[in-house]
C-alpha cells in the first residue's frame, strides 16, 4: 500500500496524466444480414431496405460497388508535464501515445440487372467472435504448358538462340493458399529445346536437343484489377488486400510469380558435318530463377491462367567436342497457359 501511495505522489509531483479517447464512425456491420445475402438473387433494393444507404458508392464498368464501413478507434497516451505552472501553462516534457484502429468493411457488387454479383466481408480483429476458427489453407493442382520462342545468352560457339531453335515446357505446380492473394508453389517441369544447326567455317555443326528436369519452389501474388483504380483509396485497398477469407479467391486476378529451383540437364551431343563429335554439354546439375506476369480467372474450384515467364539457368557443364563449349547462363522467355483445380 505504501508503494502505491508513493507512486501516486510521485506522478502528481511530475504532473503525469493519462489520456484515453475513443471514436466510433458508423454503426457495427450486420453480420446476420450479410449472411442472408445471396449472390445472383438478392437485389439492390432489398439490400437498401435491409442495410440502408452505403457509406461509399462507386459505379464503373456497368457495376455498382456498395461499401459499408465501421471504424472503432482508441487513442491512449501518457503526458509528463512540469510540476510548476507559469501563468497557467505547464510545459510538456514527453508524451507517449498509442493508436489502435479497427475497421470492418463490407463490399457488395451489383450488375446491370440490379442483382448482387459478389460480396465480401472483412471484420477487424476486435470484432471477430471469441474462439472462432481461422479459415484453413486451400490447396491447388496447377498443370501448365509453355512455349519458348526466344532463347538468348552466350552458348560458347554461338548464342543459345542459334544452338537451339525453340523450346517447350511440360509440368506444373502444387499450390497452397494461406491467404486469398498469395500462393506458395512447389513445381516440377520437363523442358525440351530443339537442337539447331550453325556454320563453323566450312563445316556445319548440328546440335542434339537439350532436355532438362526442374524442381522449383516459390510464390504467386494475386491482385484484383480494381487495386489500380483504387490505389489512393485506403479503405478500398484495405478491403481488397486485408482478408483471410479463402472463399473470396474468385474472379479475375493479375499475377506476379517468382521461383528458384534446381535443374538437371542431360548430355547434349554435337555432330560436325554429320559425324558425331562428342558432347557439347555434359550431364550436370545447376540452379534456376524465374519471374513471371500473368492473368487468371477463377471459379469456385476451377481456374484458367496465362502469362509470360523469364527464366535464367546457370551455364551448363562444358563437353568434350572440339568446339568452344564453355557457355554462360541460359535465358529464355516462355508463354504459358494452364489450369487450376482446387482439392
Image (cartoon, helix red, strand yellow):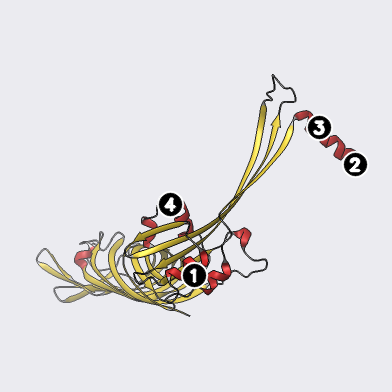
Q: Nearer the viewer, residue 49 or 213?
A: 49
Disc 4, SS: loop
- Provide the residue designation for mark 2: 1
Give the mark toward the camera: 1 or 2.
2
User: Label 1 neighbourhood size at 10 Å, few (<14), some (14-19), many (20+)?
Assistant: some
Q: Which residue is mark 1?
A: 177
Task: Characterize the local packing of mark 4: few (<14), some (14-19) or many (20 or more) Cα atoms within 10 angstroms.
Answer: few
| Callout in the foreground (4, 2) | 4
In primary-sequence order, the first of circles 4 and 2 is 2
Specify whether 239 is left or right of 132. left
The correct choice, above or below, for 72 with respect to 300 in the image is above
Depth check: 56 or 205 in front? 56
Frontmost of labels 3 and 4 is 4
Residue positioned 38% across, 63% down in the render: 64
Residue 218 is drawn in which quadrant?
bottom left
- Relative placement, left or right, of 343 versus 61 is right
Marks 4 and 2 in Cβ contact (< 8 Å): no
Q: Which mark is residue 10?
A: 3
| Mark earlier in primary sequence (2, 3) | 2
| Residue for badge 4 | 233
Q: Residue at x 65, y 44 (%)?
A: 21
Residues at marks 3 and 4, CA–CA distance in whole angstroms = 47 Å
Q: CA distance from mark 4 to mark 2?
A: 53 Å
Residue 323 appears at what percent x and percent y?
A: 22, 64
Q: Residues within 10 Å of mark 2 (few under 14, many from 20)?
A: few
- Dot 2 falls on a residue whose secondary structure is loop
In the displayed structure, 297 sits above or below 3; it is: below
Q: Residue furthest top?
A: 87
Q: Position of residue 273 (x, y in %)?
A: 13, 73
The residue drawn where x is 34% and y is 63% is 292
Amino acid at each position: 500500500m505504501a508503494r502505491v501511495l508513493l507512486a501516486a505522489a510521485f506522478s502528481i509531483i511530475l504532473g503525469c496524466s493519462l489520456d484515453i479517447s475513443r471514436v466510433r464512425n458508423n454503426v457495427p456491420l450486420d453480420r446476420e444480414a450479410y449472411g442472408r445475402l445471396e449472390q445472383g438473387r438478392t437485389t439492390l433494393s432489398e439490400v437498401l431496405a435491409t442495410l440502408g444507404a452505403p457509406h461509399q458508392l462507386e459505379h464503373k464498368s456497368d457495376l455498382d460497388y456498395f461499401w459499408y464501413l465501421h471504424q472503432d478507434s482508441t487513442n491512449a497516451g501518457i503526458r509528463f508535464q512540469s510540476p510548476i505552472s507559469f501563468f497557467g501553462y505547464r510545459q510538456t516534457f514527453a508524451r507517449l501515445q498509442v493508436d489502435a484502429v479497427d475497421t470492418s468493411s463490407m463490399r457488395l457488387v451489383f450488375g446491370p440487372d440490379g442483382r448482387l454479383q459478389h460480396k465480401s466481408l472483412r471484420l477487424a480483429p476486435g470484432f471477430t467472435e471469441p474462439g472462432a476458427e481461422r479459415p484453413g489453407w486451400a490447396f491447388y493442382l496447377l498443370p501448365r504448358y509453355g512455349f519458348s520462342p526466344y532463347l538468348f545468352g552466350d552458348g560458347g560457339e554461338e548464342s543459345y538462340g542459334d544452338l537451339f531453335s525453340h523450346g517447350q515446357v511440360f509440368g506444373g505446380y502444387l499450390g497452397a493458399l494461406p491467404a486469398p492473394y498469395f500462393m506458395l508453389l512447389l513445381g516440377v517441369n520437363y523442358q525440351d529445346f530443339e537442337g539447331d544447326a550453325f556454320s563453323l567455317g566450312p563445316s556445319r555443326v548440328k546440335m542434339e536437343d537439350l532436355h532438362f528436369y526442374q524442381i522449383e519452389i516459390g510464390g504467386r501474388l494475386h491482385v484484383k484489377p480494381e487495386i489500380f483504380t483504387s490505389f489512393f483509396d485506403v479503405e478500398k485497398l484495405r478491403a481488397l488486400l486485408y482478408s483471410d477469407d479463402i472463399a473470396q479467391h474468385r474472379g479475375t486476378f493479375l499475377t506476379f510469380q517468382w521461383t528458384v529451383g534446381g535443374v538437371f540437364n542431360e548430355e547434349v551431343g554435337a555432330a560436325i558435318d554429320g559425324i558425331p563429335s562428342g558432347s557439347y554439354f555434359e550431364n550436370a546439375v545447376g540452379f534456376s530463377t524465374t519471374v513471371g506476369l500473368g492473368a487468371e480467372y477463377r471459379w469456385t474450384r476451377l481456374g484458367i491462367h496465362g502469362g509470360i515467364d523469364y527464366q535464367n539457368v546457370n551455364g551448363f557443364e562444358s563437353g568434350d567436342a572440339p568446339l568452344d563449349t564453355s557457355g554462360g547462363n541460359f535465358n529464355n522467355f516462355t508463354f504459358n497457359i494452364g489450369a487450376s483445380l482446387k482439392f
